Amino acid sequence: MSDKPNDKKPPRKPRAAVNKADSEISKPVQSESPLSFDTSAVDVEKRKFITIATACVGAAGALGIMAPPFVGSMAPSERAKAAGAPVEVDISKLEAGSMMTVEWRGKPVWIIKRTPEQTAELAKHNDSLSDPNCDVTSQQPAYCKNASRSIKQDIAVIIGICTHLGCSPSAKMQKGGDMGDAWTGGFFCPCHGSKFDLAGRVFKGSPAPTNLVVPPHQYLTDTTLLIGVDKAEA
Ligand code: FES
């Protein structure tokens, strides 16, 4: 037996690695790789717009939204009815200091359960707000034109769409943090910097012209909300 290394035969490749059919299948996949696109042909401005629009819509869509069931399989008239139908929401598991999001008429609706401290803060920053007393009556039903903009003092129901250009603001419910020491909790719209408190009232200096909208709603039980219809209409 020789000691020369060249006498050793190279190990044989596994059969699958040299299978002709496999190599033929892989070719078109490689040729369609996004890396082969001519990026100089991409309209950069259009791409920016699509990115921003997607971010706005995505913010609304990513938050545990509840939609009417089986809408896709309904007849057109049934679909239209379901899309505008009131939404019943169980809030029994909503904890103080947290919020949930449901969908009503294609819009995100925030249900916020304020802590007693957060509710008490609402009255302390009226001077910093554009419409502290909710005088723009289009922004809430008459039964929510009060200090907490709500039926129950601790529960806010607000449409999560900025009144500037329609993006969905981010929840910043905790005090301070990246919003600064004076921040007592609320919402921040990163699109152009509008700020809202935990009742959806807009802070002065924001590009948003009005408070966030409070939709019509009522309580069916202590822990069941019906969003989309006033008590008088039910
Ligand atoms: S869309 Fe909210 S600040 Fe412009």
Image (cartoon, rainbow, N blue to C red):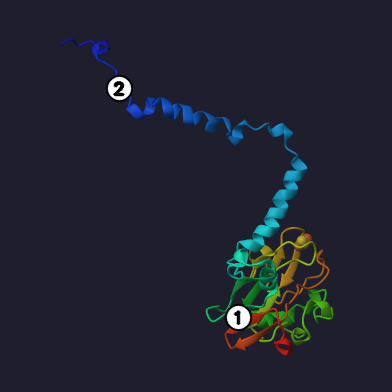
Left or right, 77 with respect to 32, comes to right
x 72%, y 32%: residue: 40
Q: Quadrant of residue 206?
A: bottom right
According to the picture, the residue beneath numbered tag 1 turns out to be: 115
Would you place residue 45 above or below residue 89 in this image? above
Q: Secondary structure at mark 1?
A: loop
Q: Secondary structure at mark 2?
A: loop
x 82%, y 66%: residue: 205
The one nearer the camera, 124 or 228, is: 228
Q: Is residue 105 visible to the viewer in this orientation of the structure?
A: no
Residue 114 pos. (x, y %): 62, 79
Q: Quadrant of residue 46?
A: top right
Tell me the crowding category of disc 1: few under 14, some 14 to 19, or many 20 or more residues within 10 angstroms, Cα based. some
Closer to the chain start, of discs 2 and 1, is 2
Mark count: 2
Residue 51 pos. (x, y %): 70, 50
Badge 2 vs badge 1, beta-carbon distance below 8 Å: no
**The C terminus: image quadrant:** bottom right
Residue 29 pos. (x, y %): 53, 33
x 60%, y 72%: residue: 100
**The N terminus: image quadrant:** top left
According to the picture, the residue beneath numbered tag 2 turns out to be: 12
